[in-house]
Amino acid sequence: MLRSVILLSSFLVMATPHTLAQTNAQPDPFQRSAPTQNTPVLQTTQTPVAQAAPPSLPAQAPSFGSPRTSSDSSTTRVVFDLPTGVAYTLTPTFTGLRLDVRGARITPAVTARLGPSVTEYRATSTNVLLSTPFPLALSDGWRASEATLASGSRVLILEFGPTLSGGAGPTLKAGTLKVAGVAAPAPAPAVTAVAPVTASAKPQPLVPVAKQPTNLPAGLPPGDTLTSGQGLPAAPILPSAPDQNTPNVTAGRVPGSVQAGATLAQPRLGKNPGQTRVVLDLPPGTGYRIVPSGLSLRVELTGVTAAPQESTDVSPELRSWRYSQEGGTLVATLVTGTPMSMRRGWHVQLLPPLAGDRSRLVLDLSPAYADLTPLPAAQRQIAAVPPVPATRGTAMLALSASYVQPRVVIDPGHGGKDPGAVGIIVEKEVNLEIARRVQTLLRAAGVDAVLTRANDTFIPLEGRPAIASPGTQLFVSIHVNSTEPYAALRNYGIETWWNPNHPLSSNLAQVLQDNMVEMTGAVSRGLKNRTSLSVLRNSRVPAALVEVGFTSHPIEGQNLLDSNYLDRLAVGIARGIRQALVTGITASGSGTPVAAGGAGK
């Protein structure tokens, strides 16, 4: 699929603040080459930043900056005056919008929270950064236009909001749009002219640009329309934890004795596409307990204190954090805005000090985190499936036996010259690996599980359902999802597709979806049926297509590299198939059709 390189806006240096200069000599999987992450602003302030103007500007160069702002619900509007002769470049990123200005002196300043959708305004001598609590795509999350006021002066109008679309509008005369870390299916307008000396254009209304629907090739799931390319990098991961059998170790104590009067500094933050890293530097003897609760994590600390403080609109994965004292316990609350559980949404590990005596409690936050722990041996076994009466065709094959093993066709999507979606993983390879594991589990349970392809072979779409010969009870196709880079961070989780080719196809889709989500702890995207898919509509038996995750997401793509996670997916699919077989959701069964809708169910 078409992807573009992401410029990471911030990286986390995991050494303690007072030892940063010493860390280059020590191997540390969390060090980054980018500048140190700035600590969050705790209150609204406006502080001039002392920086020299670029020497190439003449002394009489006009000034740029000091915007006017307004907000309406979740939308924030920022308006800049455009002096004559100024030119600028707009660069949407995962943390906001950057304006590189030429032909004017920028007024340096830092202002916290211009509105609900602009969390910081930062102007230096060469550019302006407008930080947003959500990632910006080429045309999503913002829009820009120019207009001429009644006085004749020209202004640049920037609007930000999680539901806005439009990007750089056609009225831009002095600006150029630069793509940095995002991509879109259509080219964006690029205007290189500087602001006119005499402005006579009439003000233009702000009209959002409607998104165009994707025209899908006949019979393919939406994610299969994307081909390989450069895209979002994988997020940094924690080293292997000592206890691989526990999703998250929620309680512990830092080695050493409690230090009287020890205080906790603000959390250190690292931001990568799809993931936010929070590091608490804990003194010796500190006890910790982590409790996932609804849309937040509660970190209870003993043996350390801190002044009450908080910060909001930190990142897409971290809405806010705050410290509060509850008796002898210091509570750090991390509000994520997405559901958290013991198995979903976060990973944690206590790491030893690099220097000094402060250990590092590292919490990685992402809604795409799932359960990567190994399955106990007992859960890797599928209960036996009883044989079924032989149909007329299968009786001949079974030498007229009265009962035969139920036959199920497993279809690993793509193969051969067709790689499917290519991102952190190659889809055709993961599809085949999961299918082989499902086949092994089902055969041990007494099911005649047949693969449409057992190796890296290309099979046309129309030839796959044809493999379901008479006597086949179910058809299940396995795929990996993907989406365009500009939408990658908003798409993660498991979904299952069905078509009305058979009255029980929606029932099959539901039991597959339920079992996969139960085994993995991944986000459920529900059932989908808005598109007619070739391998489903041409099947004569109950059929479903599972999308086990998004290779385009920086976290979920890494999940699909993990053998433990593939085991959980395979067991979930195998359990769903068994449930269907024993409850009559089969070609020859008596299962009762249930209402199952499209997207969102």
Image (tube, rainbow, N blue to C red):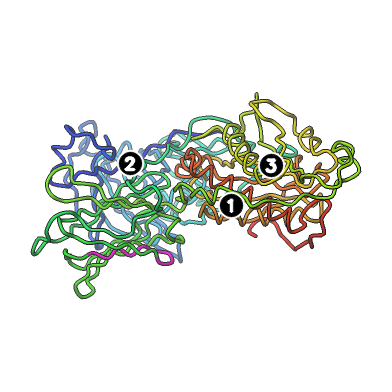
Determine the secondary structure under disc 2. Answer: loop
Q: Which residues are magenta?
A: 293-301
Indicate the position of residue 554 as horizontal and vertical percent values: 45, 42
Q: Residue furthest right?
A: 392
Label 1 environment density (alpha carbons within 10 Å; few <14, some 14–19, many ≥20) = many
Element carrying mark 1 = helix
Question: Does residue 304 appear left or right of residue 595 in this picture?
Answer: left
What label does residue 239 carry, if any?
2
Residue 469 numbered mark, or none: none
- How packed mark 3 is, by other alpha carbons closer than 10 Å (few <14, some 14-19, many 20 or more), is many
> On the rendered structure, is 12 left or right of 382?
left
Q: Residue 244 appears at what percent x and percent y?
A: 38, 47
Whether residue 247 is visible, yes or no, is yes
**Which label is found at residue 516?**
1
Q: Is residue 171 visible?
A: no
Cα distance in 3D space between marks 1 and 3: 14 Å
| Amino acid on which disc 3 is placed | Ser
Along the polypeptide, which appears first: circle 1 or circle 3? 3
Closer to the chain start, of discs 2 and 1, is: 2
User: With respect to residue 129, does 27 lie above or below?
Assistant: above
Figure quadrant of the C terminus: bottom right
